[in-house]
Amino acid sequence: MNISAMKTVALQFGLSLLLANLSFAEGGPQGDIQTLLDEQNIVVGWDPEQLIHGTNDIILSRGTWSDSLVAAYTEKYRHRPLVLPLSGPRMADRSELDAFSHTQHSQVYYLYLRLPDAAAQKEETVKKLEALLQPDFQDKLKEYNLYQTPEHYQRLWRVRLGLLPAQFSGGDY
């Protein structure tokens, strides 16, 4: 295969991946979770670079970030991003807690965020995020065939958002 043919194949492959990602973001579980967050007036981006470079304060990610993305964020802000596991597509053959716990990390939706420094903005953001833990939002997740956030992750959220003290010094729970 000559260089020109290899470039054509690479371009076609890249284009097909881009189109697949665009169509995936518009529908299915990812589109559903975007809709639910929009209804809560929570603006999220999908590109980690938006959080790293400060153009968006909350990023919804299907799966965890790579080490290089976490390192880029950490280098810029001198702390790791705040990560909150939210939900994942439901599996019919498992109980809620068991299934969420066994869902591959690449299938779980995480919110990566940077809380604002200003007290009023931080308080507003925390209130919006706390609303995602309320039964009405959790029921909506279930209606959209997504897992509800397990109780131990809800506690993790509350500790990381500063709503509850950690059980142990420096802990997340």
Image (cartoon, helix red, strand yellow):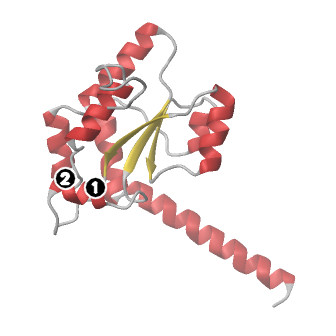
| Amino acid of disc 2 | Leu
Total marks placed? 2
Give, as a three-letter code, the residue at label 1.
Ser
Q: Which of the 4 image quarters holds residue 8?
A: bottom right
Left or right of 169 on screen, residue 165:
left
Residue at the outermost bottom position: 1
Q: Position of residue 123 (x, y in %)?
A: 37, 14
Crowding at dot 1, Cα within 10 Å, few <14 / some 14-19 / many 20+, comes out as few
Q: Quadrant of the C terminus?
A: top left
Q: Name the residue tied to disc 2.
A: 97
Where residue 11 sits in the image (x, y, percent)? 70, 72
Q: CA distance from mark 2 to mark 1?
A: 6 Å
Q: Which mark is residue 101?
A: 1
In percent of the image, x 50 and y 66: which residue is there? 20
Position of 74 relative to 61 (above/below): above
SS class of the residue under badge 1?
Answer: helix
Number of the label disc, if any, that sits on residue 123: none
Q: 43 above or below 107? A: above
Q: Are dots 2 and 1 in contact, CB under 8 Å? A: yes
Extreme top residue here? 119
The image shows residue 65, relative to residue 119, as above or below, that is below
Q: Residue at x 68, y 30 (%)?
A: 76
Which quadrant is home to the N terminus? bottom right
Q: Is residue 7 left or right of residue 105?
A: right
- The residue most toward the front is 168
Q: Is residue 68 left or right of residue 60?
A: right
Secondary structure, mark 2, is helix
Residue 49 position by quadrant: top right
Q: Which residue is pictured at 84% across the width and 81% down the height?
A: 4
Residue at (61% x, 29% y) in the render: 54
